[in-house]
Image (tube, coloured by chain):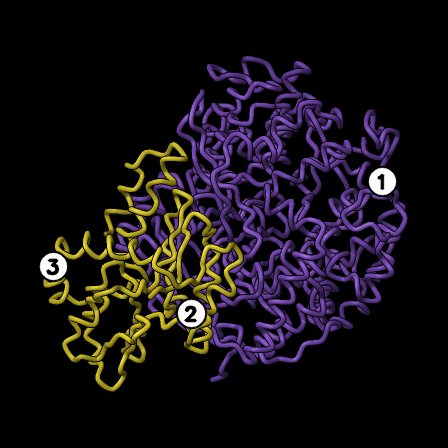
Chain colours: A yellow, B purple
Amino acid sequence: MAGVIIDAEKCTNCGICELICSLTKNQAFNPAKSRIKVVPLDYLGFSNPVTCILCKNPKCVELCPEGALSQTETGMIQVDEEKCNGCRICIDVCIIGAVNFDEKRNLPLICDLCGGKPACVEWCPEGALSFEIGPAKRKEREEIAIESVPAKRKEREEIAIESVPAKRKGRKEITYTASKAKPFLKKCGIPEEALDWYKKFA
Amino acid sequence: MTRYYGWAGAILNVDLTVGKAEKEPLSPDFARKYLGGSGFNSARLFELVKPETDALSPNNVLMFGIGTLSGTMAPGSARLTVTAKSPLTDVFGDANMGGFWSTEVKFAGYDQLAFFGKADHPVYLWIDNDKVEIRDASHLWGMSTWDVARAIKEEIGDPFIEVVCIGPAGENLVRIANVMCPTKRAAGRSGMGAVMGSKNLKAIAVRGTTDIAIARPNEFLQACKQTIEMIIDSSPWYQMYRDYGTPGIIHTTAEIGMTAVRNWQKNVFPNWEAISGRALKRDFYRSMRACAACHIACGPFHTIKSGEFAGVYGEGPEYGLTQMGLICECDNLAAILKMNELYNQYGMDCVSANSILAWAMECYEKGILTKEDYGDDRPLQFGDYKSVIEIIPKIARREGFGNILAEGEKRAPKLVGRGSEKYMIHVKGQAPVVEDPRANKGFGLFYMTGTRGADHLKANILYALYILRDTDIGKEISTGDLGGMKGIGRPEGVGKKVMWGENTTQILDSLGICTRTTGSLDLLTKMVSSATGVDFTDKELLTIGERIFNIQKAFNARQGLTRKDDNYSTPRFEKDPVLDGPFKGNVLERDVLLDEYYTLRDWDMKTGLQTRKKLAELGLEHVADELAKVNAVK
């Protein structure tokens, strides 16, 4: 099981992945409807494309109240559009903030690997995106799954109560991106405190 | 209600005096005739701003023209044009910018934003798709561009909205103030930031989450892919930009002695390598950043880890690095990066600023300016980077001698007098970048004919030659050495290159496409046709480009500009030969160049004024009528 692999340090923030994804899956250019979200830390020169990492035990599937999400044998998340209630709980519980939402159709937008040939991988001009299947990637994802879940449980309940604002990229993606940025900042000699401004929103 | 493809389909008119914003549908005829971006802006500016209007008065109109292809995957389609009457030159003014703000405006549903009047207190505009609010900015006034963008993002609660803003320079109506999209994107030239400041408009924040539809997506993507591959395979500059960004240009221009050094006193700067793209990459580079939809990614993100300027980090600079180094004869790259940071934070055009500083340096050298003029401040001197770093905030705040420098290329020498005027090089009130007009005759001509004064971005000959290379025109004007430097010092055929360069540039500035990522005219036509569903031809695009350039020219002609104004502030380029380097001995053949150019343009050779015949051909009869009222058309 493996999704699109991201090498964030190669990402130049061009956003071509967001554009081709929204065109391919939603028939129009609109990064707000992309299933891969480029999270820019503009002031720090670092960007992290965030998309479904095909968790071994996906929280979105587990916690969907309608049972509208399921996971295929290859690990891909599927959305049953009939069953979906538009509650957005899947957006909140995704540990890295990879789930997007189509406001108009009231449905979650989750990477489905374009049926095996991800368009974003094809178009990324920097080779920051790749698509490989292999055991080497599995370990990385498990570590993330263990780390984040317990800390988030309380927060999720609170979020479910208040209305979700129409932000393109939210708390989870910011936290995830900030953690990925640390080695880059170290190389640059930029202090970690520089992330504090972004963490205000996370 | 027209369903739009490619275009967003609406214009936002904001009356700041009254405090109202109105969304107006885009007219299909207007869209087809003027394309987008620079085209929309130029057409409206001619209608809306009269010759007697002072650029800093509420009657000036400030426009942000988004490219037709912005928000799509057309390579490098992130660009927008900011247009208004310029407070620096008092004629047509505009500035161009990349990044992500333009695409955000497009996704919010607008092809152009236009600002009228003046707010009675500092405000910023918040555009959330079709919800538009004019918000109080009194608490933001005085902030640097970096700080205000962050403050607004905190206020809105979203770090990923896009913000353009002015810094203290714009607020203080510094005539060379720019419009910034922090950290480094700048609509630099012509003092557009001062116009924004004169309207009490501190910033425009935007979030856009609506669709941009494409008429024929497969054809469109095919054209995009072919363009990308063409650039990678055959453009002479792809690798250089990819490796170094525009700081790499100096590798060619300084090496061949085409540059202007020490306020145009000489052409060779022996230590240019110290401020080159290679030096930047070796010592300070961390990563390359891209504009929206760009596969080249030419923006070097840098950090200074140690030394006097430790702690400076950010994106850029552009070729302005050369301006800061060569013209002021400074070879300390870290200091230049600090200057870059200050210009960005205070919101000022580094090209004009450094030209004015170099003028002041020469005046000090010649004893025209003395310590008394500077009071307690450090006098500006060649090579003294500390004096530059100290004075930048003072220009922005109009303090001390900074207040004179803040008046720009035309006015500062007049204020000083004492014969200082002859050391300021400009055309129509704006200084050029440091390419010698006598060395590169193309530059020599288009500095004079550029509609916003001297500037290097109205003709883009090198890119135009590449884009047009497979057309009849291209074959006619090409000397067969794209990217090579043979023959650029000769005047033959230059008029043609400049004319087609200027026309082609208007196409790109209207579509919102970067010169570096455009493959061929043919592919451009395919992209815009398949995106919009309107079947343009190559010829039609070139006509539109010519039309837009002519409207800009007409704006100036209506104010009384003629052939005499297509000239430098000094006759020295015509009289004094180049003293050193490969172009030694060259002078500028101004009359020969202008004669050829005006004839090709079908303008009157003696006055440089447009002919009614040409304007009618371009569908600009109404422009000809206006000009006739003031005898400005032949």
Label 2 or label 3, whichever comes before in sequence order? 2
Q: Which residue, given by chain and number where applicable, does mark 3 sit on?
A: A153
Q: Amino acid at mark 1?
A: Gly
**Which quarter of the figure is the C terminus of chain B placed in?**
bottom right
**Where does residue B290 sit, x and y in percent of width and height?**
51, 51
Residue B188: quarter of image? top right
**Where does residue B458 sit, x and y in percent of width and height?**
68, 52
Q: Disc 2 vs disc 3: which is toward the camera? A: 3
Horizontal arrangement in the rendering, residue B288 relative to residue A1 (left or right): right
Residue A52 seen anywhere in this rendered image of the structure? yes
Q: Which mark is residue A30?
A: 2
**Where does residue B572 sit, x and y in percent of width and height?**
81, 30
Q: CA distance from mark 1 to mark 3?
A: 71 Å
Marks 1/3 in contact by CB < 8 Å: the verdict is no
- Chain on which label 3 sits: A
- Chain on which label 2 sits: A
Q: Residue at x 75, y 38 (%)?
A: B568
Q: Around disc 3, counting alpha carbons within 10 Å, would you say few (fewer than 14), some (14 to 19), or many (20 or more)?
A: few
Residue B505: quarter of image? bottom right
- Chain on which label 1 sits: B
Q: Is residue B11 above or below residue B406?
A: below
Q: CA distance from mark 2 to mark 1?
A: 47 Å
Q: Secondary structure at mark 3?
A: helix
Q: Residue at x 43, y 43 (%)?
A: B183
